[in-house]
Image (cartoon, rainbow, N blue to C red):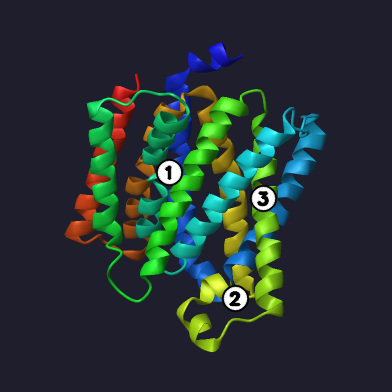
Amino acid sequence: MNNILQTRPVLGVVLVISSMGMIGLIDNFIRLIAKEAGLWQFHLLRSLVVCSCLLVIARLMHWRLRPKNWRAVVLRSFAFSSAMVLYFGSAGIISVSQAASGLFTGPVFVLLISASFLGVRIGIWRILAVAIGFGGVLLILRPDRGALSIMSVLPLFAGLFYALSGIATRRWCGQESTMTLNMGAFLGLGLWGALGVVVFTLFPVPPEIARALPFFTRGWVHPSGAFVLWMLVQAFGSMAATALLTRGYLLADVSFASGAEYSFLIFVALWGYVLWGSVPDPVSALGAGAIVLSGVIILVRSR
């Protein structure tokens, strides 16, 4: 089965890019969600919707949801859900483009992890790609500016967990179905959401912290109509996009797939301009260009 998957890298990359275009659109609505409720309530309710739909689809289509390798799926789900919690948590406060630039250090971490722990040799071009990509991230995040710089650093940790989930998908979950991996990912997000709702509802943070980080520290609130609408848009959009992304990782080597994910930076900026008229400043645009160049180098040298 693995040999078959490795002969379809083009289709895998196309699926990943399609997924990025879809996610770039729906993630631009996170600013509307952040005005209505908290990060944890969003993940909890979105996961309930997605997991319910996946259960119904699996039953109707007689698809298997039970993992063949429980340990691998649990580890992959933990890594992926942790990455998304950190990404969305920062995206509700800093811009989506900034949060995405941190998240997309994932391919850089893939190379570093592969070289350090998986015995993969990294030549001068890949080292150059790491340097360029990291430089681009610093240009966008500029973590020394403002009191909320901690929210600019969180996406870097999201990138680390995202890299781990990508490696786990390819190396240990190749025999799992897309439906199984999607269910695991959203169950993980739902558990994170439930934990956060309980903690921040029962133990509210001090007012000054709540004012500075409302999306990240808000407990349960009565869902408004606007929140329900945009949560459902996120639920169904992310369900479709995650299916494409997961399948793409199963069809293409992690270096190809992770390189193709850099297209998200283009899509999120494009949709931000179309929806909100947001235009990146020159320094951020230069940083995004550096990150894309890094991805291209990684993709070419991974052949």
Residue 151: x %, y % from top left:
42, 66
Numbered mark located on residue 188 in the image: 3
- The dot on residue 223 is none
> How many C-alpha atoms fall within 10 Å of the one at disc 3: few (<14), some, or many (≥20)?
many
| Mark pair 1, 2: CA separation | 29 Å
Compared with 150, 188 (above or below) is above
The numbered mark, 1 or 2, whose residue comes first in the sequence reads 1
Quadrant housing residue 60: top right
Specify the amino acid type for callout 2: Arg
Q: Earlier in the sequence, mark 2 or mark 3?
A: 3
| Disc 1 element | helix
Q: Quadrant of the rendered structure where residue 115 is?
A: top left
Question: Disc 3 or disc 1, which is closer to the eye?
Answer: 3
Q: Is residue 266 above or below residue 233?
A: above
Disc number lying in front (1 or 2): 2
- Location of the C terminus by quadrant is top left
Residue drawn where x is 45% and y is 62% of the image? 91
Q: Which mark is residue 218?
A: 2
Secondary element at tag 3: helix
Q: Amino acid at mark 3?
A: Gly
User: Residue at label 1?
Assistant: 21
Of the numbered discs 3 and 1, the one sitting upstream in the chain is 1
